[in-house]
Image (spheres, rainbow, N blue to C red):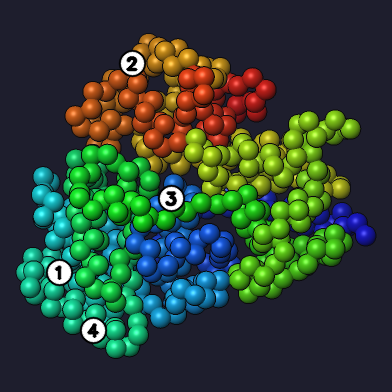
């Protein structure tokens, strides 16, 4: 039995209606919703209270999971997915979320509390203050000014008495207080201040091992944790114990199919699965990964072939252009070969919005290629929010054919005065520049900055290249590659 043309159209319209620019915050307007909850097996460690540091690039789900942990209903739902973690025994408060309001603490409150040029000791007291605030909120009391907690935290014996007393109560009840720190890339706009605050936070986290019933959990970008200028004796242990948020191809397709299984398109999707002889599953079954499409790649490939056709080109030799299942995964990776769910879903949304609807499928190969362009534009736009220098650095490279010898790339930047402009603009506008203090700004260091965040990489033959995820929107060329926007 073939799926009806109307069901395919319903699925296409549902996919096209999803917001392409959707992102999550730990709380507030963009807090995660239960219908968006999908729990890959590999993410169990990320939610485990015993895992102190969770690292991941933008779009991998750091703020999403922070929000899940901080919401009682979502945490209860996540407990179905990860029953061995004891999430139902957690009490959760936010320590820092980069957002204003009563839930978390943002940069403005931090700056008001810690003066410019503060020492690591002063900054560490601030992090102890966030813990005292979390304890008071967990006791049902309204938050006071962070400055009040800071003054209390400066009294070492006093703060330890408060922490120890609350930890004992938690132990008696068999509970754990988890204090979540998210959006930590927003701490500062200079390298020196970010390092002071990050180092103080990591030292605070290490000291928290003294209380088993109270656990901090940090959601960090990899480049922040791996900053070589951070000097702390126990830092290697923290780095070794850090959990990295990653998504396999099967996880990404499972997420896509799980999203299609809820909402207005649910009946059409259910009929499509039935026509293929594939099983349907309830939301609870999907959450607990008791659904064939949550892990079985062969079943996923069969479903993707029904949605998009099997190959990226028609005719008997269409397979030479690649399988529709594999193509997005090969072209959406950054320089570390990581594909984020945000980019993956953006490609699918872009594909559904491209061209007239076909009669025998939901999306087309050409739509998938267009979806890559849409995902690339979105990712580069997000990079501009994250690294304000990125636009001026990529712009001179437009039209360059990759891969390229490094000196040819450096020469383009040199002629455009890119390095000098990046330094001046960062200083004038007060944002974090690509070059750390005490680093001699140069074209080579500019490449290192791009390499560090996964935007460029060096091939085996030593030539420089850029993943399609960034190359397409940055308007660089590649022989046989998807044409730029």
Badge 1 is on which residue?
Answer: 149
Badge 3 is on which residue?
Answer: 56
User: Can the viewer see residue 413 in this picture?
Assistant: yes
In 3D space, how far apart are the residues under numbered discs 3 and 4 (Cα atoms)?
A: 33 Å
* Residue 324 percent across, percent down from the top left: 74, 42
* Horizontal side, residue 90 vs residue 344: left or right: left
Picture quadrant where residue 145 is located: bottom left
Mark found first going from the N terminus, 1 or 3: 3
Tell us which disc is closer to us: 1 or 4.
4
Mark found first going from the N terminus, 3 or 4: 3
Residue 417: mark in rendering: 2
Query: Label 3: few (<14), some or many (≥20) within 10 Å?
Result: some
In 3D space, how far apart are the residues under numbered discs 2 and 4 (Cα atoms)?
A: 60 Å
Residue found 80% across the figure and 43% down from its top? 310
Looking at the picture, does residue 394 appear above or below residue 366? above
Quadrant holding the C terminus? top right
In 3D space, how far apart are the residues under numbered discs 2 and 1 (Cα atoms)?
A: 47 Å
Tell us which disc is closer to us: 3 or 4.
4
Mark found first going from the N terminus, 1 or 4: 1
C-beta proximity under 8 Å, tags 3 and 2: no
Mark found first going from the N terminus, 3 or 2: 3
C-beta proximity under 8 Å, tags 1 and 3: no
In 3D space, how far apart are the residues under numbered discs 3 and 2 (Cα atoms)?
A: 32 Å
Residue found 38% across the figure and 42% down from its top? 386
* Horizontal side, residue 223 vs residue 369: left or right: left
The secondary element bearing badge 4 is classed as: helix
Tell us which disc is closer to us: 2 or 4.
4
Residue 168: mark in rendering: 4
Tell us which disc is closer to us: 3 or 2.
3
Quadrant holding the N terminus? bottom right
Residue found 33% across the figure and 77% down from its top? 176
């Amino acid at each position: 039995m073939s799926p009806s043309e109307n069901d395919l159209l319903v699925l296409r319209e549902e996919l096209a209606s999803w917001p392409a620019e959707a992102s999550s915050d730990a709380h507030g307007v963009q807090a995660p919703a239960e219908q968006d909850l999908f729990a890959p097996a590999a993410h169990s460690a990320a939610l485990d209270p015993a895992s102190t540091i969770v690292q991941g690039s933008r779009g991998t789900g750091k703020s999403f999971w922070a929000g899940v942990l901080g919401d009682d209903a979502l945490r209860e739902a996540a407990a179905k997915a990860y029953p061995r973690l004891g999430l139902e025994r957690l009490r959760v408060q936010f320590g820092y979320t980069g957002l204003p309001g009563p839930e978390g603490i943002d940069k403005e409150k931090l700056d008001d509390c810690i003066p410019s040029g503060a020492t690591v000791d002063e900054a560490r007291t601030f992090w102890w203050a966030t813990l005292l605030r979390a304890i008071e909120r967990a006791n049902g009391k309204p938050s006071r000014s962070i400055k009040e907690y800071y003054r209390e935290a400066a009294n070492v014996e006093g703060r330890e008495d408060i922490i120890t007393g609350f930890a004992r109560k938690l132990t008696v009840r068999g509970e754990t207080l988890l204090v979540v720190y998210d959006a930590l890339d927003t701490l500062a706009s200079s390298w020196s201040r970010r390092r002071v605050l990050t180092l103080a936070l990591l030292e605070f986290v290490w000291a928290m091992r003294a209380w088993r019933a109270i656990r901090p959990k940090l959601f960090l970008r990899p480049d922040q944790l791996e900053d070589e200028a951070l000097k702390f004796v126990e830092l290697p242990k923290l780095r070794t114990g850090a959990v990295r948020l990653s998504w396999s191809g099967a996880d990404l397709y499972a997420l896509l199919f799980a999203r299609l299984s809820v909402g207005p398109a649910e009946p059409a999707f259910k009929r499509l699965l039935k026509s293929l002889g594939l099983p349907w599953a309830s939301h609870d079954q999907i959450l607990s990964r008791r659904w064939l499409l949550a892990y079985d790649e062969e079943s996923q490939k069969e479903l993707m072939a029904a949605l998009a056709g099997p190959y990226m080109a028609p005719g008997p030799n269409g397979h030479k252009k690649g399988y529709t299942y594999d193509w997005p995964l090969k072209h959406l990776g950054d320089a570390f070969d990581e594909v984020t769910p945000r980019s993956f879903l953006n490609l699918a949304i872009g594909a559904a919005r491209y061209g007239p609807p076909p009669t025998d499928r939901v999306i087309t190969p050409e739509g998938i290629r267009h979806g890559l362009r849409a995902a690339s534009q979105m990712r580069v736009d997000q990079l501009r929010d994250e690294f304000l220098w990125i636009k001026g650095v990529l712009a001179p490279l437009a039209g360059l054919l990759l891969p390229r010898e490094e000196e040819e790339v450096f020469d383009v930047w040199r002629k455009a005065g890119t390095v000098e402009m990046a330094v001046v603009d960062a200083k004038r506008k007060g944002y974090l520049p690509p070059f750390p203090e005490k680093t001699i700004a140069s074209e080579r260091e500019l490449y290192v900055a791009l390499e560090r965040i996964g935007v460029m990489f060096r091939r085996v033959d030593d030539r420089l290249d850029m993943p399609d995820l960034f190359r397409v929107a940055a308007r660089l060329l590649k022989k046989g590659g998807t044409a730029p926007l």
